[in-house]
Amino acid sequence: MNEVTRILYAIQEGQTHAAVELWPLIYEELRRLAAAKMAREKPGLTLQPTALVHEAWLRLVGDEQPTWENRAHFFGAAAEAMRRILVERARRRLRLRHGGGQERVDIDEVEIAAPTDDEDLLAVHDALDRFAALDPEKAEFVKLRYFVGLSLEETASALGVSLTTAKRWWQYARAWLKVEMRRN
């Protein structure tokens, strides 16, 4: 059991001092992931990696104390929080610009680990929501790869699957999303 999982269990057991130990352990990893994600975004963004991490953290702990089963569950929740922050930001900007017209996007033309503009991000978000209804595990995999920017190896480790399985899931998810995005 790694240190993060141990601390998450301690928090679940009511050891409130354990929460103080969690932040330093996860902050650097979340910051690194957010920085990698933001480095691939368009220049001139007002959202910085530190702000993305802090906003995600606030959503993770919020008013209620969630319970995380393990490190993978925690980082999955972090990926979802970052995803929602980026999607809300994109929607807010599109709402302000020209009525937010949408265009079709071929997923092969979009670098899957880093959406480059708001329309692409929202198209992937909508398709991913439909994918999650059909296959939540693989949708979680895509969230970690696409919105957090984890490598195949990191994503496989976070979800506790083999690299071979991760490669299969990634191939399937990309194909499914490509077809779904063409349809809409």
Image: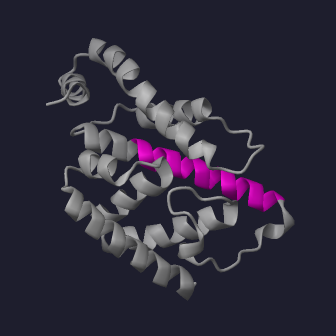
Relative to 33, 159 lies left or right:
left
Q: Is residue 47 above or below residue 163?
A: above
Q: Is residue 36 above or below residue 169?
A: above
Q: Quadrant of residue 104?
A: bottom right
Q: Residue at 71%, 75% (x, y): give it.
A: 102
Q: Residue at 37%, 67% (x, y): give it.
A: 132
Relative image position of residue 34 (x, y in whole percent): 53, 39
Q: What's the magenta region? A: 78-96
Q: Residue at 62%, 49% (x, y): give it.
A: 40
Confirm whether residue 133 shows in the render.
Answer: no
The quadrant of the image that shows the C terminus is bottom right
The quadrant of the image that shows the N terminus is top left
Relative image position of residue 157 (x, y in whole percent): 25, 46
Q: Is residue 135 above or below residue 156?
A: below
Confirm whether residue 105 shows in the render.
Answer: yes
Q: Nearer the viewer, residue 114 or 7?
A: 114
Q: Residue furthest bottom?
A: 183
Q: Nearer the viewer, residue 36 or 7?
A: 36
Q: Quadrant of residue 17?
A: top left
Residue 67 magenta? no
Q: Residue at 32%, 36% (x, y): give it.
A: 66
Residue 79 magenta? yes
Q: Residue furthest top?
A: 17
Relative image position of residue 92 (x, y in whole percent): 72, 54
Q: Residue furthest right?
A: 98
Q: Is residue 147 above or below residue 94?
A: above
Q: Main secondary structure of the magenta part?
A: helix
